[in-house]
Amino acid sequence: MAYQNIIVEEAENWAWITLNRPKANALSLELMLELGAALGEWRDHRAVRCVLITGGGDRFFSAGADVPTIQKTLGNPITGGSLLEAGVKTVNAIEAYPKPVIAVVNGMAFGGGCELTLACHLRIAADTAQFGQPEINLGIIPGWGGTHRLPRLIGESRAMEWLLTGRTFSAQEALQAGLVCKVVPKEALKSAASELAKVIAGKPVAATHATLEVIRERALYPERGIELEATAFAKVAATKDAAEGVAAFLEKRPAKFTGE
C-alpha cells in the first residue's frame, strides 16, 4: 500500500514507521488512518516481530493532533470518520498490538503525539526530546488516552501535575518518572532503538505476545493478575520454543527459537 503521510520500511526482523507530515508531523485524520493500516499489514507478518515508530525531520516526533481539524469539530467532535474517533481507534490498536511497538522519540512529542507514545509498549528518547500534554492550555483535555495512560505509567500525582499545568518536560525528567526506558544522544538514537528491537525480536514469539497480553489485561483487571499470568504461562509452556529454551539453558548453549 502506498502512503502519503508515513514512511514504512523493514529492517531485519522488525519494521520502522516514520511520521512524515512536515513541518511538525501533526497527526491528521489521514495520517492516523495510514498508521493503523500499516500496523494491520504487519500484524500477521511472521518476519516482522517488532515495530518502531519515529518522527521525520530533526525537531518533531509529533506536535500533536492537527489543530485546524480540532477547531472545525469542537462543537461535535465525535462523528463518523472524525479525527478523535480515528485517533482513539489507532492508539488503542497500538496498545493491543500482539507485537512490541516502540516509540523512538526523536524530538518534541506534544498532545496527541505524546499520547501516541503512551500507547506504545516501550519508549526510547533522544536526549533532546521533549514531552507534554498541553491540551489544558487550549481549553480542552487529552482525547486519545492521556488521562488514563499517563497516570498508569508515571503515577497519579505526577501525571496530575503534568496534565493540569500543561508544561513541557524533558527526556531526562521522562526517564526519571519512568515514562521512557532509555535516553541516548540524538545521533545514537536510531542505532540504539535498532539494537533494542534486535534483542526483543530475537525472543520467542509466544512468550513475547503473552507478556504483552498479560500486562495489558492486568491493567484492565488488576484483581485477575495472578490468574491471567497462570493461564498464559500454561499456554506458553506447551510451545516448542519453551522446550528449546529450557533445554538450551540446561545444556549451556544458545537457544534456537523458531516461533513455534
Image (cartoon, rainbow, N blue to C red):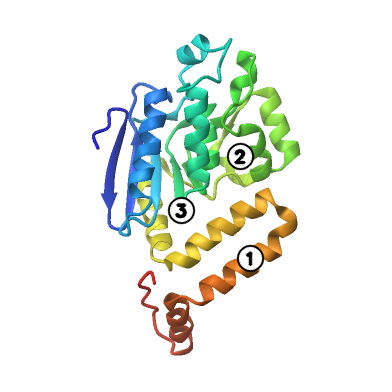
User: Label 2: which residue?
Assistant: 173
Foreground mark, 2 or 3?
A: 3
In this view of the protein, can residue 120 be seen by the observer? Answer: yes
Mark 2–mark 1 CB contact (< 8 Å): no
Q: Residue furthest bottom?
A: 251
Q: Nearer the viewer, residue 191 or 1?
A: 1
Q: Nearer the viewer, mark 1 or mark 3?
A: 1
Q: Could you tell which of marks 2 and 1 lies nearer the N-terminus?
A: 2
Q: Could you say where residue 29 lies in the image, as x and y percent from the top left?
A: 41, 24
| Residue positioned 75% across, 56% down in the render | 223
**Residue 229 - label:** 1
Residue that numbered label 3 is attached to: 100
The span from disc 2 to disc 1 (Cα, nearest Å) is 32 Å
- Residue placed at 64% from the left, 14% from the top? 139
Answer left or right for 185 relative to 232. Answer: left
Lower position in the chain sequence, tag 1 or tag 3: 3
196 shown above or below 16: below
Q: Please name the amino acid that badge 2 sits on.
A: Glu
105 vs 47, nearest the viewer: 47
- Which quadrant holds the N terminus? top left
Element at badge 1? helix
Q: Is residue 130 visible?
A: no
Label total for image: 3
Residue 113 in percent (x, y) is at 49, 30
